[in-house]
Image (cartoon, grey):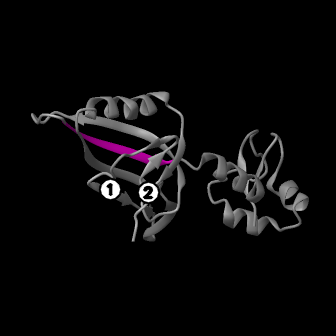
Amino acid sequence: MKIQPMSYKNYVWPFNPKQVEVAYSRNIQNLKLPLYGSVLQDLGFDKRVVTGSGEFIGSGCMEEFSRLAAVFASGESGLLRLPGDTPFPAAFASLKMIGEAQPDCVSYSFVFVEDDAGTEEASLSETSYVCKGGESLWEVANLYGTDVDTLKNLNPLIQWPNALEGGQKVVLP
């Protein structure tokens, strides 16, 4: 079986890194409530974090690291392709050259963080409403053909349902 090479934007690793770790996590918070105790709140998934390390070997190892550093310096998010995984948008968060005294060998480590801001914004617009200011939860409920209780349950952080602020997001059913 041939393993696809790792790539980011237009950079393709000549040899896949020695070690690649993809971390998935959820944001779970313990909310303390007076006279009730505590409740666990699942605030959803965190962004995937990809860490890894490897070596560039040969007479052009420093030039290869420089090409990777130029991709890092561009600062824009791009498509990250990992061997055996579906490509996803990511930001290049960290790149380190690890100083080990070896001829014709440059060791490095990297960190990528998933960046689905564009995808998230598109899905957010379909499932939420951005208030213009001076509106109430009742008006939003009538606008979307739902009831206030449903909106209140979906938006527990709304303190004043009769006076929504401009720019405030209301999650819709």
Comparing 112 with 66, the one in front is 66
Looking at the image, residue 80 lies above or below residue 142: above
Instruction: Give coordinates of residue 9: x percent, y percent.
Output: 52, 42
Label 1 Cα crowd, 10 Å radius (few <14 / some 14-19 / many 20+): some
Q: Earlier in the sequence, mark 1 or mark 2?
A: 1
What residue appears at the point 45 percent right and 63 percent down from the top-left corner? 34
- The relative height of residue 90 versus residue 173 in the rendered view (above or below) is above
- What is the x, y in percent for residue 93? 41, 39
Does residue 22 belong to the magenta stretch?
Answer: no
128 left or right of 89 in image: right
Q: Which residues are magenta?
A: 105-114
Relative to 152, is 112 above or below?
A: above
> Residue 84 occupies which quadrant of the picture?
bottom left
Question: Dot 2: few (<14), some (14–19), or many (≥20) neighbours within 10 Å?
Answer: some
> Which residue is identified by label 1?
20
Q: Is residue 106 magenta?
A: yes
> Could you say whether the residue bearing mark 1 is in a helix, strand or loop?
strand
Q: Position of residue 135 (x, y in %)?
A: 84, 46
User: Tag 2: residue type?
Assistant: Leu
At 51% from the left and 61% from the top, the residue drawn is 43
- Quarter of the view holding residue 100: top left
What secondary structure prevails in the magenta region? strand
| Residue lying furthest left | 101
Q: CA distance from mark 1 to mark 2?
A: 9 Å
Q: Amino acid at mark 1?
A: Val
Q: Provide the residue designation for mark 2.
A: 82
Q: Are the residues tagged 1 and 2 within 8 Å (C-beta)?
A: yes
Relative depth, front residue between 6 and 19: 6
Quadrant assignment, res 98: top left
